[in-house]
Amino acid sequence: MAGIEQKNVGQPDEESDYGEHGASAKVSVGIPGFGLGSESTVWLSTLRPGWSWERNIKPNVPFESCPLHHREYVVAGRIRYVMDDGTAVEASAGDHLLIDPGHQAEVVGDETCLLLDW
């Protein structure tokens, strides 16, 4: 039996509000027994100039750096990632990244950064 589940980030399952620095919206869909994986989650983040992990995330979590693994696609703007070992990458529109735990990030420049993360 085939199945499709559809959700829109305009009506998210979960939201993170970064005040003047933007927001993130999460939607999850699941198709039991689909075979390739029964659940998929996507975050759409709109991060304005001034957003950083240090400023907007770290004060609310008990970690020195992000403990999550990310697959990201940069739709617009620029963002800089710095790993705990000092390795740094700046990404811009069209870039796809695979990011291990142990990093921080910040928006670069004066343009809003739009990210898809799954």
Image (cartoon, helix red, strand yellow):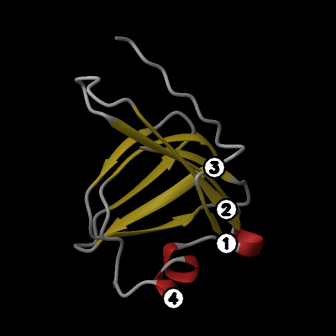
Residue beneath disc 3: 12
Describe the element under mark 2 as helix, strand or loop.
strand
Query: Is residue 4 shown left or right of residue 107?
Result: left
Circle 1/circle 2 CB separation < 8 Å: yes
Which amino acid type is shown beneath numbered disc 2? Ala
Q: Earlier in the sequence, mark 3 or mark 4?
A: 3
Residue beneath disc 1: 18
Which amino acid type is shown beneath numbered disc 3? Pro
Describe the element under mark 3 as helix, strand or loop.
loop
The span from disc 3 to disc 2 (Cα, nearest Å) is 12 Å
Q: Earlier in the sequence, mark 1 or mark 2?
A: 1
Q: Earlier in the sequence, mark 3 or mark 2?
A: 3
Which amino acid type is shown beneath numbered disc 1? Tyr
Circle 3/circle 2 CB separation < 8 Å: no
Residue beneath disc 2: 23
Q: Nearer the viewer, residue 95 or 25?
A: 25
Q: Residue placed at 30% from the left, 56% from the top?
A: 69
Which amino acid type is shown beneath numbered disc 4? Pro
The span from disc 4 to disc 2 (Cα, nearest Å) is 16 Å
The span from disc 3 to disc 4 (Cα, nearest Å) is 24 Å
Residue beneath disc 4: 59
